[in-house]
Image (spheres, helix red, strand yellow):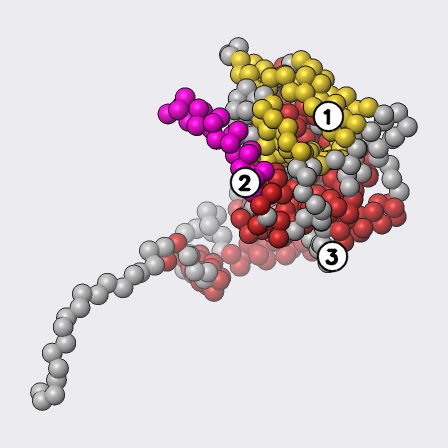
């Protein structure tokens, strides 16, 4: 399996006919079992790209192609949204089985699968709680479990931890790293946080400011499992520095343009 | 005094909670006591015969009138007639209101067709349509049920429409990304999202239903609380009339309580 993001461009046209160019000629591939991170300054079109890949938005040109999936009946994608997007009227368990329900999986099996992912994200004992009874970090765990339970070919995450406080965010990064090392899902992760990008990814796609173009694609050759110790290592810091070098220029230009 | 030390005077300002008047205290006993006090005052005024009983019968005499009506069972006939009309009108209006509201909220063609029709018919006081309904449907039950249904339909359809328009688009996206089709989006996302709005519509609707059932029964009926009140007034039976008003008050309170309970049961995710 391989997902090809084939020369995607996107121009938004609003009601008054004014156009905003969000993405320009984005072209890269996500390999099987690969953790790809897209990093770029705010407003550069990251969410736009993710929505196009998820089939929740049409591109202006170019296409997203899933290769080698003829024999696979699994859903193409599942999304973990920044704002959790949990169904408030469903308990944790019922949220997690939503995708399985839609695919007609038997109830007994739904529960078995859900229990497995509840354990994986560490939410045992909260199966019958409603989302409003959970903390932000727990909600995001439910959202991750819901996406994983749906067993997609490609997991998509749009700044999943940016609504969390700094400490919870760091812990969730370790957690996600662990979960990914256990499941090895093909994953596209979007963030504007460079440290996060280097810590999590196998490859980092660096986008320019709007209209988003690919500035560089950097392979992160850091050993796994990755843990807290990594953030002190020289190579980690070099990667962070290299990406910051790209983005700093962009961010400065953007600031000078608006200010 | 010896030994008294002259302390330097320090200006002190202790911070007060400026919001404390917002925390309204509950006075359950006062509610009950004042209610009883008003009843007693009323009873006293009537007993002293300062106001003729034809205008203001004593609470005790209204109660005993109500008791006789209960014993003879005559009261049940009226309550039953009115409740049946309300129930039919209400059920028809709620189901139609929810369906139409979702339809015009979710699909563009029904919205384009339905919106102007609703905007044009909504402002007409429904009781003004009753003569037309009697012309079409006759003087029997159908026209009364229809006028109640019309009255309840509008707040319901408008509430549901607003609810559908305000469904979090992110939840729809989430459901789509988890494999829902359009029909399932309506059943599994839209419907639960708008449940609180449906209950709000029902609470608005029951008030309107009570108003319209009484009005319709005053125009043409041979049973019902509205009919009972009107005939009592014609015959100067003020006590009987008052019993009718009390029943209407109790019905209103009962339905509000019922909808509150139903909402708690069906919308457990809202604290
Ligand atoms: N529906 C829309 N109509 C018009 N312009 C839009 C629309 N959605 C997004 N845009 C514009 O497209 C650009 C990219 O938006 P997008 O949300 O993809 O950015 P982002 O990289 O995800 O930003 P952030 O880091 O703040 O989440 C922005 O300039 C935004 O103003
Ligand atoms: Mg975004």
In percent of the image, x 70 and y 45: which residue is there? A223
Q: Is residue B175 above or below residue B243?
A: above
Q: Is residue B1 above or below residue A44?
A: below
Q: Measured from the top left, where is residue A233 in percent x and y?
A: 59, 48
What is the crowding at mark 3: few (fewer than 14 residues within 10 Å), some, or many (at least 20)? few
Nearest-to-viewer mark from 2 and 3: 3
Chain letter of disc 1 in the image: A
The N terminus of chain B sits in image quarter: bottom left
Q: Do dots 1 and 3 share one subunit? A: yes
Q: Main secondary structure of the magenta part?
A: helix
Dot label at residue A124? 3
Which residue is more in the foreground, A112 or B106?
Answer: A112
Dot label at residue A29? 1
Magenta range is A236-259
Dots 2 and 1: beta carbons under 8 Å? no
Q: Measured from the top left, where is residue B267 in percent x and y?
A: 66, 46
Residue identifier under label 2: B233
Chain letter of disc 3 in the image: A
Examine the rendering and report whether any part of residue B109 can be seen. Answer: no
In percent of the image, x 82 and y 29: which residue is there? A1
Chain letter of disc 2 in the image: B
Q: Is mark 3 within 8 Å of ligand 2?
A: no
Query: Which numbered disc flags the more N-terminal residue, 1 or 3?
Result: 1
Element marked by disc 3: loop
Nearest-to-viewer mark from 1 and 3: 1
Distance between mark 2 and mark 3 Cα atoms: 67 Å
Distance between mark 2 and mark 1 Cα atoms: 84 Å
Q: Is residue A70 above or below residue A34?
A: above
Nearest-to-viewer mark from 2 and 1: 1
């Amino acid at each position: 399996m391989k997902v090809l993001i084939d020369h995607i461009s996107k121009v938004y046209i609003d009601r008054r006919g004014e156009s905003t160019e969000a993405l320009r000629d984005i072209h890269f591939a996500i390999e099987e079992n690969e953790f790809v991170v897209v990093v770029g300054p705010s407003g550069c079109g990251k969410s736009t790209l993710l929505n196009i890949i998820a089939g929740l938005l049409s591109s202006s040109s170019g296409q997203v192609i899933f290769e080698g999936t003829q024999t696979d009946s699994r859903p193409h994608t599942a999304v973990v949204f920044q704002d959790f997007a949990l169904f408030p009227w469903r308990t944790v368990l019922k949220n997690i089985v939503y995708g399985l329900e839609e695919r007609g999986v038997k109830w007994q099996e739904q529960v078995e699968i859900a229990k497995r992912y509840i354990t994986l994200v560490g939410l045992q004992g909260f199966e019958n709680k409603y989302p409003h009874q959970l903390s932000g970090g727990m909600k995001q765990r439910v959202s991750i479990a819901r996406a994983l339970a749906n067993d997609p070919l490609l997991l998509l995450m749009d700044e999943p931890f940016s609504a969390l406080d700094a400490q919870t965010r760091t812990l969730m990064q370790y957690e996600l790293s662990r979960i990914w090392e256990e499941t090895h899902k093909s994953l596209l992760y979007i963030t504007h946080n460079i440290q996060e990008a280097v810590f999590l990814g196998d490859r980092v796609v660096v986008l320019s400011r709007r209209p988003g173009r690919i500035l560089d694609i950097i392979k992160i050759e850091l050993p796994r499992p990755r843990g807290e110790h990594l953030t002190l290592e020289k190579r980690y810091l070099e990667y962070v520095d290299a990406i910051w070098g790209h983005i700093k220029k962009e961010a400065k230009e953007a600031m000078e343009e608006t200010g | 005094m010896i030994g008294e030390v002259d302390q330097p005077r320090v200006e002190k300002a202790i911070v007060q909670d400026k919001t404390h008047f917002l925390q309204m205290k509950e006075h359950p006993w006062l509610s009950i006591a004042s209610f009883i006090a008003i009843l007693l005052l009323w009873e006293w005024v009537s007993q002293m015969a300062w106001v003729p009983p034809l205008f203001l019968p004593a609470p005790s005499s209204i109660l005993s009138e109500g008791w006789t009506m209960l014993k003879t069972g005559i009261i049940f006939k009226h309550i039953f007639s009115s409740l049946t009309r309300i129930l039919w009108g209400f059920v028809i209006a709620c189901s139609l209101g929810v369906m139409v509201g979702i339809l015009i909220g979710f699909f563009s063609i029904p919205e384009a067709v339905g919106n102007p029709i609703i905007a044009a018919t909504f402002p007409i006081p429904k009781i003004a349509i009753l003569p037309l309904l009697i012309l079409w449907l006759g003087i029997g039950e159908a026209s009364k049920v229809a006028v109640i249904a019309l009255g309840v339909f509008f707040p319901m359809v408008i509430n549901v429409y607003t609810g559908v328009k305000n469904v979090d688009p992110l939840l729809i996206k989430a459901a789509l990304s988890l494999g829902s089709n359009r029909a399932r989006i309506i059943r599994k996302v839209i419907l639960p999202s708008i449940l609180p709005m449906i209950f709000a519509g029902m609470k608005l609707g029951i008030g309107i239903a009570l108003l319209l059932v009484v009005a319709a029964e005053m125009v043409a009926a041979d049973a019902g609380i509205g009919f009972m009140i009107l005939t009592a007034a014609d015959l100067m039976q003020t006590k009987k009339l008052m019993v009718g008003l009390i029943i209407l008050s109790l019905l209103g309170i009962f339905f509000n309580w019922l909808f509150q309970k139903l909402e708690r049961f069906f919308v457990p995710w809202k604290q």
